[in-house]
Structure formats: C-alpha cells, structure tokens
Image (cartoon, rainbow, N blue to C red):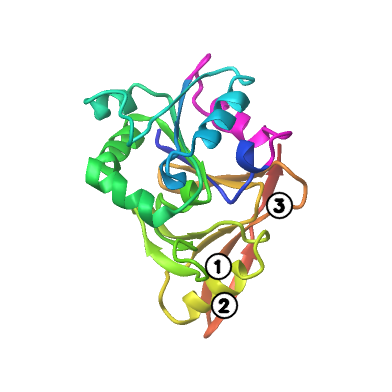
Amino acid sequence: MRQIIAMGGGGFSMESDNLALDRYVVKQTGKARPTVCFLPTASGDAETYCLRFYEAFASLDCRPSHLSLFHLPTADLESFVLEKDAIYVGGGNTRSMLVLWREWGLDAILRKAWHKGVVLAGLSAGAICWFEQGVTDSLPGQYTALPCLGFLRGSCCPHYDGEPERRPSYHRLLAEGKIAPGIALDNSAAAHFVDDKLSRVVCSRPHARAYMVEKAGGKTRERVLETHSL
C-alpha cells in the first residue's frame, strides 16, 4: 500500500502542544515503534528544526532519525531511506529542496520508498513536493506555481487559511492556466492519499478544512471536503 500524508501546516513545526497530526503519521505505518526519518532539507537543515523534531517525536511511540544532505550519514542513501517506516519532510524553500534532492538522486529513492510501502508525509514544502505542482513562496514576495515530483496528480496549496494571499494566488494561477486543479489545505489539515487516491482528510483543530479547487464555467470553484477531527 502506497501512502502519502500531505499537511497544510501544523504538527510539531507549528503546534508544539498538539502532536495529533504527527501521531497520525506514526500510526499509519502499522508498526510497533516505527522508524521515522525527518528530512529538513527545505530549511537548509536548520539545527533548531531538527532538535524540535527529536523533542516532539521522542514523546511518540517511534524511533526518530534525520537525513542531512550536508552531513551525510552514509554513502548508501538508498538503503538508509528504504529501511525506514516513515519519511517526514519539513517546511521551507521547496524549490531549493527539490534541486538538492534531484542532485543526490533522492527523488528517485523516495519514489522507490513510496512503492515499497514507506509512509511519505510532510507539511508545507513537505506537502506540495509530492504533487505535480504546488503553490510556493520560494521566491520572496511571490506566490508561483512550482513543478514538483509528480507522485500525485494535480496541484496542492498549503497554509490556505494561514496566509492572506494563499487563496487568491491559487485562484489566480488556476484562472491563468499556470497550475492544474488540485487540493488546498488549511493549517492543521492533512490529506491522506492511499494508492494515488484521496482516502480521507483529518485535522488537529476543529475548523481546519481541505478543499478541491478547480475551474468550472470559467470560474474557480471550491468544494469543501469531509474532514475527520483527530
């Protein structure tokens, strides 16, 4: 079973007192004390970000680790990744992250991991990276469409309720034909895909939602998705 859990925001990065989404990711492995590997590439492997990950996941029933492409733990990255039960990708600059992943061949390794049954998850950059396209602020002061890995069809926009320009930017890009229809995720909302299809939407705070966003009759249309509170 192939699984991807895309979070619009939240988790230990944004809700240190509410680890419901992180706990959900761990649970989907179906393992007792699974191995969960954090990829902080998008943040430039920020040390404080890694420390926050370890502090949070130490309280969950798992074995945390992280992968730095600046301080490699091994020359055999494929074996290192494929032995994990879950990969958790942090936020930051998606464009820079994808460039590094492709240079190191990590994009291909992650696809192998996905097909092998490793749970792929993440928020913000770690959410949009799995889709064909994502709405990104990788360029300062701009929201643009970014080609991503294409494991999942369509596009993704995170922080839909968290940043004032996210929603209008997604609508504009869609209207201009610069981005494909897709899913928008509020902070604290996560879309769980199983075998390429959306299985369910979950949230860690009551009013967080996800939306299917598409063009219909020349206009942008949003459809609120059923959401299960954790």
Q: Is residue 33 magenta?
A: yes
Residue 189 placement (x, y as % from top left): 64, 48
> Label 1: how many residues lie within 10 Å, few (<14), some (14-19) or many (20+)?
many
Q: Secondary structure at mark 1?
A: strand
Q: Quadrant of the N terminus?
A: top left
Q: Quadrant of the C terminus?
A: top right
- Is 73 rendered above or below residue 183? above
Residue at position x 38%, y 57% in the image? 95
Please tell me in which quadrant of the rendered image residue 23 appears. top right
What's drawn in magenta, residue-wise?
Answer: 15-34
In terms of sequence position, does the residue under pointer 2 or pointer 3 come before the other?
Answer: 3
User: Which residue does the numbered mark 2 point to in the structure image?
Assistant: 220
Residue 4 placement (x, y as % from top left): 46, 41
Residue at position x 33%, y 33% in the image? 113
In terms of sequence position, does the residue under pointer 1 or pointer 3 come before the other?
Answer: 3
Q: Would residue 99 appear left or right of 6 to someone viewing this image?
A: left
Q: Would residue 45 appear left or right of 24 to someone viewing this image?
A: left
Please tell me in which quadrant of the rendered image residue 211 appears. bottom right
Residue 140 visible (yes or no): yes
Q: CA distance from mark 2 to mark 1?
A: 7 Å
Q: Would residue 156 appear left or right of 148 to someone viewing this image?
A: right
Q: CA distance from mark 1 to mark 3?
A: 16 Å
Q: Main secondary structure of the magenta part?
A: loop
User: Which residue does the numbered mark 3 point to in the structure image?
Assistant: 208
Tell me which amino acid carries mark 1. Answer: Val
Q: Which mark is residue 213?
A: 1
- Is 5 rendered above or below residue 161? above
Q: Secondary structure at mark 2?
A: strand
Tell me which amino acid carries mark 3. Answer: Ala
- Front residue (pair 142, 153): 142
Q: Secondary structure at mark 3?
A: loop
- Front residue (pair 67, 226): 67
